[in-house]
Amino acid sequence: DAQESRGLGDVYKRQVLGAAVGQAVLGSKVGNKALLYGAVAGTIPDLDVVSRFFVDTVTALEFHRGFTHSILFSVLFAPLFGWLVSKREKEATWREWSWLFFFGFLTHPLLDAHTTWGTQLFWPFDLRLAFKNIFVVDPLYTLPFLLCCILVLFKKRGTPARRRLNNIGLLLSSSYLLLTLVIKGITFLKFEKALKDQQIPYTEIQTKPAPLNAVLWLANVATKDAFLIGDYSLFDSKAISFGKHPKNHHLLGDLANNDKVKRLIKLTNGWYTVSQIEGKLYFNDLRFGLLSTDVTKQAYVFSFLLDQTGEELVITENKKRPADAAGLLVDLWQRIQGN
């Protein structure tokens, strides 16, 4: 569901980063244990997804990447986890273990800030950082980084080769992250030019990478009565085309004043449409794109059924089908290669 996709879906990326940070902080002293506990530290913030078992859908969405992804969490809980580990692992002091957990916790939300969902790094302040320059799962970021971490495991602690391999992994991943920012800037200008050439008036534009890569990019464009969705691959030769998605906000009716709906609207920053299918009302979060490479198709990654029974409004996320993902991967690979 939404929590798994926005949290545990990228757990390997966070574990690898945490392991590399653990090695950088304490590897010369405790060896491979630094990678192990670093990976643990890189995973812990995403355990906020368990909130979905105890609260309603909207509250769980609000909680995800909130407190556990903040500087405050790193400051408060790193000493606690450092103390717990120091009781078992005597090679390093409580303070040294605390530093490992602090940097493991902190680098996690710093990386998350580059994704579409973003993170509340400065919680409790109501500010979510979302640079939208890397997809939540990107093999080109993770795999070279992971390879370096695996090779580190076979080098003796304290050796220059071990430190060098770890630094190469950190350098490769950081360089790729910077590269995606450059590509984001290039593709943003492409979308702006296409809108100008097609004489499309708009009020706002947001761009993000398509799943699993940084070659194909998507744009959400806000107009008066609709949102436009377009895509652009670095290998494209034809003009960018945009699919129209009517806002239909009027379909909410009195539900627009419902507390849960207002909170959903706030989470999307206004990037949502409403659709009515077979008498049922759906709230569609546009920020995460479509379950299709066809930008005209109204099949959204995150769509919520608004079911009002009497006085109570129940909001549930539409479940995904494995067949949807399998078909999308094939289409995505073809679309990345250009139009």
Image (cartoon, helix red, strand yellow):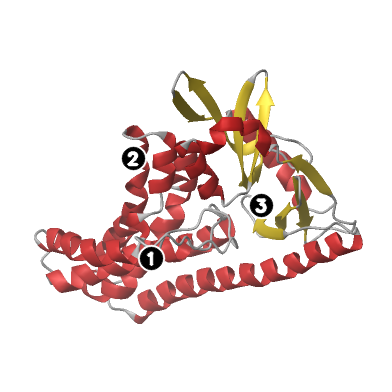
Question: Which residue position holds label 3?
Answer: 210
90 is higher (above) or lower (below) than 322:
below
Kind of residue indicated by mark 1 = Phe
Q: Nearer the viewer, residue 235 or 241?
A: 241
Label 2 to label 3: alpha-carbon separation = 28 Å
Residue receiving disc 1: 122
Badge 2 or badge 1: first in the primary sequence: 2
The answer to whether residue 157 shows anywhere in this view is no
Q: Residues within 10 Å of mark 3 (few under 14, many from 20)?
A: many
Tags 2 and 3 touching, CB below 8 Å: no
Q: Answer left or right for 275 relative to 67.
A: right
Marks 2,1: beta carbons within 8 A: no
**Residue at 69% over, 70% down:** 185
Picture residue at 56% right of the left edge, 74% below the top? 175
Q: Position of residue 279 (x, y in %)?
A: 65, 18
- Residue 306 picture location, percent across and down: 54, 28
Whether residue 228 sits left or right of residue 313 in the image: it is right
- How far apart marks 2 and 1 lie (CA) works out to 20 Å
Tag 2's secondary structure?
A: helix
Q: Callout 3: helix, strand or loop? A: loop
Determine which residue is flagged by label 2: 51
User: Residue 332 appears in which quarter of the rendering?
Assistant: top right
